[in-house]
Amino acid sequence: TQPLSEVDPEIADVLRRELGRQRDYLEMIASENFVPRAVLEAQGSVLTNKYAEGYPGRRYYGGCEYVDIAESLAIQRAKDLFGAEHANVQPHAGAQANAAALYALAAVGDTILGQELSHGGHLTHGMKLNFSGRNYNAVSYGVDPETYRVDMDIVREKALEHRPTVLIAGWSAYPRQLDFAAFRSIADEVGAKLWVDMAHFAGLVAAGLHPSPVPYADVVTSTVHKTLAGPRSGVVLSTAEYQKKIDSAVFPGQQGGPLMHVIAAKATAFMLAGTDEFRDRQQRTISGAQIIAERLMAKDTADNGISVLTGGTDVHLVLVDLRNAAIDGKQSEDLLHEVGITVNRNSIPFDPRPPMVTSGLRIGTAALATRGFGDAEFAEVAEIIAAVLTPGADIDALRARTAALAGDFPLYPGQEEW
Ligand code: PLP
């Protein structure tokens, strides 16, 4: 019954300082967000004490009557939110959801075809050191070298060449929408199953502001903590045909006891993702990214060699191309940190610099939209970023501007500690 601050002051201090950091900096890492207090409450709850191997009504442990309610609610809400025939809400994280998808759709040694990691794909889509690259024969398609977009003719060519068992659509760093109908038709043409990983854009899909992959894919995976703004975790959606395979791929295929406190928090997050407030937030997210992209393509930044990949964005992120700029990805990440903006450097397609340096920046707007930012605030953020990326920036003056924005939109107001 003793509070954390008494039991473990060192960890309590980490929490206090991290809360301060989240409040003081403008969070623009495209894969991050702020969960509402309700989600934190569910996640930091007594449900963490419960073992519940199995599924609702079919558990290997006694005493599951209440956690069954939580998991059934999470399943039903995920299905309703995305219009899916089946949902498995047990994956501990996105990588586990993706492992389950591959486990259900392919046999070890089968060929899988996904978006090249250095062109915006994810580790779990076939990177050679990841389970996906070690257990499967992973091949990839890249973006078009002129447009930097996923070109369905290239995808089709690769699919015809390699005849994959699983065709993968989805990305971690790509600013445009994918053509799911075209992916489906290529999958059908080569006899592949279609898996869509919508981890990044799931919130936009839930809000109806991005096409849904659910009508086209055999399996759709997602994280719950990016644009969806729920607890750090994963989810798998599928057609009824794959229900059994997906469930057994998650448990007992690769996980033990589900994290019932996280599943309860997922249920709350899926409910909130169906609200008008959530839709408005996703709208501000996309609009903010478009404002930043436009600003970074203006004459002054363009004259300094800065450009925006694909000439804009349809989603919650902007990919800045610094190949012709005076600063690289690492230097810009560090300078932005100095003025109070957190982003991550990112390799861009055909990047001449190594992955620890890079020639790109990935800038996301989801977390600031959650904080309440609208067009006016994103326009100010865009001015600050443009100033930081061009030579001669007045760091102290820019730091004061980010502090003013952070002060105008308090995070978790009234909360002394967490
Ligand atoms: N899939 C995509 C497209 C991602 O971007 C990520 C995370 O960055 C993941 C899966 C993995 O999620 P997690 O970090 O929760 O394992």
Image (cartoon, rainbow, N blue to C red):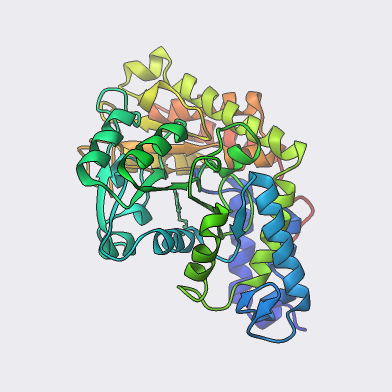
x%, y% of residue 303?
A: 33, 16
Please give the name of the residue rendered at 61% of the width and 69% of the height, measured from the top-left corner. Answer: 13
Q: In front: 102, or 372? A: 102
Check the picture and name the quadrant holding the C terminus.
bottom right
Please give the name of the residue rendered at 76% of the width and 36% of the height, measured from the top-left corner. Answer: 276
Q: Farthest residue in the bottom direction? A: 62
> Compared with residue 90, is residue 31 higher up or lower down, i.e. above or below?
above
Q: Is residue 287 left or right of residue 181?
A: right
Q: In front: 244, or 269? A: 244
Q: Is residue 418 visible?
A: no
Check the picture and name the quadrant holding the N terminus.
bottom right
Please give the name of the residue rendered at 51% of the width and 26% of the height, measured from the top-left corner. Answer: 292
Please give the name of the residue rendered at 52% of the width and 73% of the height, measured from the top-left corner. Answer: 251
> Compared with residue 262, is residue 6 higher up or lower down, i.e. above or below?
below
x%, y% of residue 359?
A: 29, 36
Q: Is residue 410 left or right of residue 108?
A: right
x%, y% of residue 155?
A: 30, 36
**Quarter holding residue 210:** top right
> Compared with residue 271, is residue 398 higher up or lower down, i.e. above or below?
above
Q: Farthest residue in the top direction? A: 299
